[in-house]
Image (cartoon, rainbow, N blue to C red):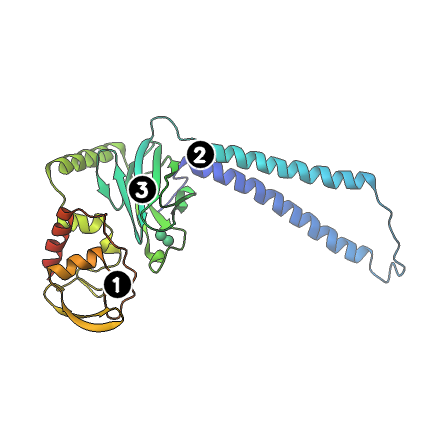
Amino acid sequence: MISGIPGLSNRVVENVFLYIAAIAVFLLALITFLMVYFVIRYRRTKHPEPKDIEGSLWLEITWTVIPTILVLTMFYYGYTGFSILRKVPEGSIKIKVLARQWSWLFEYENGIKVDELKVPVGKPIQLLLTSQDVIHSFYMPAFKIKQDAVPGMVNYLWFQPTEVGTYDVLCAEYCGLQHSSMLTKVIVLPQEEFNRWYQKGAEERVTKIPTGSQLFQEKGCRACHNIDGPPGVGPSLKGLFGKTITVITDGRERPVVADEDYLRRSLLEPNADVVKGFPPIMPSQKGLLTEEEIALIIAYMKGLK
Ligand code: CUA
């Protein structure tokens, strides 16, 4: 598990946090002490007659100036820390991050696409975030960084891992039914091991067209559809091909044979015939899949016995 400080961004965030927390704890102790002290000191048996106190210029100046300075220093540390988090170092490795209901896809400059982020230790990494559907939020608690992934725009984040290890990635913005399972990992590898993996992926990318199984993973189908077990958010695809199933079309139940036409329609117009017992929430893949990809995915589904 995590030991020490896994990334450079941590120190920046931690320093500001500790600074503000220390001031807050000090003020809490001071105010609590004074409150208790005054309750005892000015209790009714000692001071039966309350007296008005006229204003005190010095006191008012003091309690205006000191908090102002404190708040300004908090702003200063917060802002300089924020600037560091926003300023991506030269020569960072750029990785595109695509968020969608309900999985993550990482795309490297050499074309590798994976659903778990692999990075080398000690190098600055820039993540370019966008979304295919609704607003998601890319959150890596171990590195104390978080940024929204918004459809139609590209946001960014950078971090520099300092320790080899595996850390969690979460979606931190409610994005629908399976939001809570929109999880993945960032795997920090030693430089050489990363290079080997990166090289191998690039070669495979050039020499092979992706298989149906790879597409099934890349396109995020697996987030909702099991291929070998019970149904998830969507129906299980195990042994689906050729089976007669009950669907709801325009509010009416009807039987349908899960043949190639049906599977194709389900990819492009998923909510036209919704399998009975499931919510009509699958995002349409129209424009997101090429004809070749559709054919490969259908062929893959046929093989899921
Ligand atoms: Cu994606 Cu929550």
CB at mark 1 closer than 8 A to ligand 1? no
Q: Quadrant of the C terminus?
A: bottom left
Determine the residue located farthest toward the front in the rendered image.
Answer: 250
Query: Quick check: 125 above or below 262?
Result: above
Q: Amino acid at mark 2?
A: Arg
- For residue 75, which quarter of the picture? top right
Where does the image place residue 219, in percent across and percent down from the top left? Answer: 23, 49
Measured Cα–Cα span from mark 2 to mark 3: 17 Å
Is residue 15 left or right of 221 when viewed as pictured? right
Query: Quick check: 21 above or below 303?
Result: above
Query: Residue drawn at (40%, 31%), measured in percent from left and top?
Result: 88
The residue carrying pointer 3 sits among few (fewer than 14), some (14 to 19) or many (20 or more) residues within 10 Å by Cα, namely many
In the picture of the structure, the residue carrying the numbered disc 1 is 232
In the picture of the structure, the residue carrying the numbered disc 2 is 86
Where does the image place residue 171, in percent across and percent down from the top left? Answer: 37, 51
- For residue 269, which quarter of the picture? bottom left
Query: Residue drawn at (17%, 46%), measured in percent from left and top?
Result: 290
Asked whether 148 or 6 is in front, the reply is 148
In the picture of the structure, the residue carrying the numbered disc 3 is 97
Asked whether 294 or 100 is in front, the reply is 294
Q: Earlier in the sequence, mark 2 or mark 3?
A: 2
Query: Residue drawn at (83%, 56%), measured in percent from left and top?
Result: 42
